[in-house]
Amino acid sequence: MSRSPKPVTGLAAEGRIGAIDLTWDLAAWEPLVDHYAVHAGESRRVDISDDTLVGKTVYGRLTHDTLGPEARTRYYSIVTVDAAGRRSRPTAAVRGTSTESIVVGGTPVATVGAFDSKSLELALAPSGGQSRFLSTFPNGVDFTHGSSDPAADWSYLHPGPSDSWAGRRSHTFRLHFELPDAPGDDLGFAIWLIDTHATLAGTAVIAVNGTDTADVAFEGGATRGSLEGDATAPGTALRPSFVELTLPAERFAAGRNTVSITKTQGSWHAYDAVGVFRLD
């Protein structure tokens, strides 16, 4: 007599900016498992339907992303589906809450682009970065908040030393802005990406007024962000990621300031938006 597959165990959820990471222990492989169907809802009574399906996987992990900058709470339940299409009973729902971004909780000082999981408002987007970057930005990017135009002055694609189309060298993107007074508290810096290279996401150095301040390692993406610009489109393969950090107050001064991003290793990353924020 055939029997239904067993549900997974150990389901856990951990939130971060814009996403909730789910992990679980794999079900027994007898009968043969075809996939795990992950469902999400806004209450503990998760409706198991096509409308609540957020992903299928054969692994014991899945990320529910593009949740936006606000802190969002979701409840998750998983159904094991075997090779014959039989389904286990749903797991008990597990609660997960994403982390509020500084773009919500902070006060913007200087920003480039909209924090909306899209790169379409930035220069060369959605697919002109590889063919036109060097001719448009031979010396990297210099963007002045309040006078520069994101559609012309900030490339959506930031190449790295592994990119032959960008000269196999480091490129620096600089964000210039004015402060009326030297800040008394640290400032926040947000780098939102719609995608990165899958295996060569690489690293960058963040500098404040010419002084190296932080090293950043980017998450591997889907290698689609050089060609597509909307991570909210249904069925997109893009994998957004987020880097948010604090920058020491003593590095800033009254008047003109510069925060720069220099890609030091790896291939390109594709911007959604960047910004400096006061941390309220």
Image: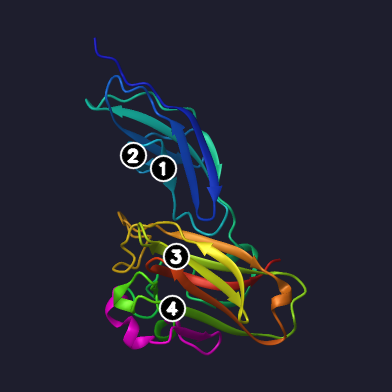
Badge 3 crowding class, 10 Å Cα cut-off, few under 14, some 14 to 19, many 20 or more, is many
Up-down: is 44 above or below 188?
A: above
What is the spatial separation of the Cα atoms under label 2 and label 3, in whole angstroms?
24 Å
Question: In front: 71, or 215?
Answer: 215
Badge 1 crowding class, 10 Å Cα cut-off, few under 14, some 14 to 19, many 20 or more, is some
| Quarter of the rendering containing residue 145 | bottom right
Q: Quickly name the residue at label 3.
A: 193
Q: Of the residues under marks 1 and 2, which one precedes in the sequence?
A: 2
Circle number at residue 171: 4
- Region of the chain picked out in magenta, as a range: 127-150
In percent of width and height, residue 182 lies at 75, 81
What is the spatial separation of the Cα atoms under label 1 and label 3, in whole angstroms?
19 Å
In percent of width and height, residue 87 lies at 31, 25
Q: Of the residues under marks 2 and 4, which one precedes in the sequence?
A: 2
Looking at the image, which residue sits at the far right?
184
The residue type indicated by label 3 comes to Leu
Q: Of the residues under marks 1 and 4, which one precedes in the sequence?
A: 1
Question: In front: 251, or 255?
Answer: 251
Q: Could you tell me if the residues under marks 2 and 3 are in contact, i.e. CB atoms within 8 Å?
A: no
What is the spatial separation of the Cα atoms under label 1 and label 4, in whole angstroms?
33 Å
Looking at the image, which residue sits at the far top?
1
